[in-house]
């Protein structure tokens, strides 16, 4: 099953802009293969600095992505990842879905 069928990039771009996203990437089974009808979608996000309510941006973006993709979403904030092995694994497979025009 192709992940592209679930990634309405226009809708995702609108949500990302509204939520102050600098960069949004997809990773995990959606990129590596093994993506199935029951798979969730893993996203890595980097928000723009100095947002008024970063928690609201995070929760809102996760909800937006679940509505757009009609899938469960795991949303990982890049700056919050402390495990270097996990971070390296994620970054090796991550593919851009949205990057802000700044």
Image (tube, rainbow, N blue to C red):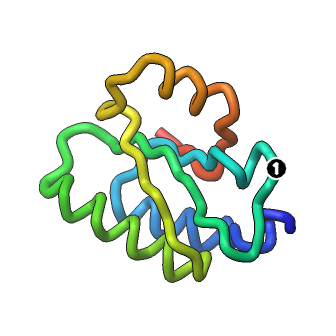
> Which residue has dot 1 on it?
33
Q: In this view, does 87 lie above or below 7?
A: above
Q: Identify which residue is drawn at 49% across, 44% down.
A: 44
User: Furthest-left residue in view?
Assistant: 52
Left or right placement of residue 35 versus residue 102 in this view: right
Nearer to us in this view, 75 or 51: 75
Nearer to us in this view, 56 or 49: 56
Label 1 residue SS? loop
Picture coordinates of residue 42 (x, y %)?
Answer: 56, 54
Nearer to us in this view, 84 or 49: 84
Left or right placement of residue 12 versus residue 30 in this view: left
Left or right placement of residue 6 versus residue 21 in this view: right
User: Furthest-right residue in view?
Assistant: 1
Q: Identify which residue is drawn at 66% across, 67% down.
A: 39
Picture coordinates of residue 49 (x, y %)?
Answer: 25, 37
Q: Identify which residue is drawn at 35% across, 61% down.
A: 19
Q: Identify which residue is drawn at 80% across, 55% down.
A: 34
Residue 100 visible, this angle: no
């Amino acid at each position: 099953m192709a992940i592209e069928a679930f990634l309405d990039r226009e809708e995702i771009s609108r949500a990302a802009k509204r939520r102050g996203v600098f960069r949004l990437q997809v990773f995990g089974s959606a990129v590596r293969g093994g993506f199935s009808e029951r798979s969730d979608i893993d996203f890595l996000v980097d928000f723009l600095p100095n947002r008024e309510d970063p928690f609201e941006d995070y929760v809102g973006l996760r909800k937006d992505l679940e509505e757009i993709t009609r899938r469960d979403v795991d949303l990982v904030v890049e700056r919050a990842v402390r495990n270097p092995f996990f971070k390296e694994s994620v970054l090796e497979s991550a593919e851009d879905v949205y990057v802000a025009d700044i």
